Structures are given as structure tokens and as C-alpha cells.
Amino acid sequence: EVRVERAIPHPRWTGRVEGGFDVVLLRLPREVHVQMPSLPRPGSPGLYPNFMVHALRLDDRLETAQLQVIDSKLCPELPPLGKGQFCAYSSGATMTPGTSGGPLLTYNQQTEAGELGVVVGIVSYANFSALDKSGVGCLLVRDVVDWIEDIIYHKVAVKVTSAVPDLVSVLL
């Protein structure tokens, strides 16, 4: 178990998932060596309807689900999505509250053995009263990758807000 040293919310986060920028980076007190998926690179292809993504959820074990990107205007059981968000859906995958905050990954034929793919989204929210029919509102990582890299490489000063708990327990 590693305690989080600081939670860093995106500066444009308003506290409403519909407004987008629903992302927090966690700074750990020490370096941790784990294999991580890649972030999208400039010029990487965007997401489009029918594109397949893979959601991860850590419960007692790591679970995965394949979802399909669908037109955000047609996202079932959710209000209209904001800028920087997209909708993913699967009639067979059950999303649970433990899925929120998890990555959405893509894989392609050029992904080498042992690579974990590219993080294209972060699960933001779903309609938990209709999970079997609900689409999933996701943050488009491509729109925040510059901010992520600025924080990782200490290019910007970090403002800590009281809206985010000081300590979050993360299991590695």
C-alpha cells in the first residue's frame, strides 16, 4: 500500500462531471516501478464511432470489458456530454462504481508484446440506476495530455484545493 502525497485536480475541473476535465493526478511520496500504458501522442488518430476500447476495473481482481465508442449525441441513458468527453457502450459489460476513474485503452496490430496499449480515456460516469442500458461518459485523454505531462515533468506550479481529499489510499 502506498499513501498518496498529493491529489492534483485539473485546473478546469468545476466539480461537475458534465463539465469535463474530470481527472486527478496522484503524486506518490516515492518512485514506484510499474509498467504503464502510453499516453496519446500529438497527431495520434482520434476516436470515432464503432472504435473498440477496453475498460479496466480493479476489484478483488483485475477485470476488463470491451466497449464500443458511439456518437456522443446518442449515448444511452446519459445527458448530453461536454467538450472533451466521449461515450462508450457495451450491452454485455456491466459497469460499476468501481470502474469510475479507470482507464480506457486501445490496442492495435502494432502494439508489441508486453505493451499495455494507449490510454485514450478515463471512465467518468454512467447512469447507475440503469447500468444495463447506460452508456459511459469518458474523459478524452488527448485533450489533457499536455497538462498531464506538465505536471509529471514539473513545468507548472501545482495549486492544491480543498475539494480533493489530502490522502487517498492506492493499492499497487
Image: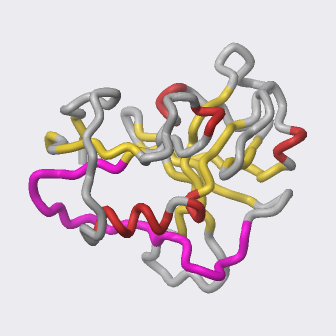
Dominant secondary structure of the magenta stretch?
A: loop
Q: Nearer the viewer, residue 61 or 74?
A: 74
Residue at 67% from the left image edge and 57% from the top image edge: 53
Q: Tell me which colouring the rendered structure shows.
A: secondary structure
Judge from the rendering whether residue 103 lies leftward or rightward of residue 6; answer left or right. Answer: right
Q: Residue furthest left?
A: 30
The residue that appears at 65% across and 82% down in the rendered structure is 43
Indicate left or right for 130 with 39 as reference.
right
Please state which of residues 74 and 14 is positioned toward the viewer in this rendering. 14
- So how many labels did they put on this image? 0
**Magenta segment includes 34:** yes
Would you say 120 lies left or right of 50 here? left
What residue lies at 50% left-to-right and 29% top-to-bottom?
A: 15
Image quadrant for the N terminus?
Answer: top left
Percent position (x, y) of residue 47?
Answer: 74, 64
- Image side of residue 151 versus residue 114, left or right: left
Q: Position of residue 54 (x, y in %)?
A: 62, 54
Q: Residue furthest top?
A: 129
Q: Which one is in front, 113 or 131?
A: 131
Q: Check the image and name the residue furthest to the right.
A: 74
Examine the image and state in which quarter residue 37 appears: bottom left
Q: Which residues are magenta?
A: 25-46
Which of the 4 image quarters holds residue 127?
top right
Work out whether 39 lies above or below 84.
below
Relative image position of residue 80 (x, y in whole percent): 80, 34
- 19 is within the stretch colored magenta: no
- Could you tell me residue 137's position as x and y percent? 68, 39
Quadrant in the rendering for residue 129: top right
Q: Residue at x 60, y 42 (%)?
A: 20
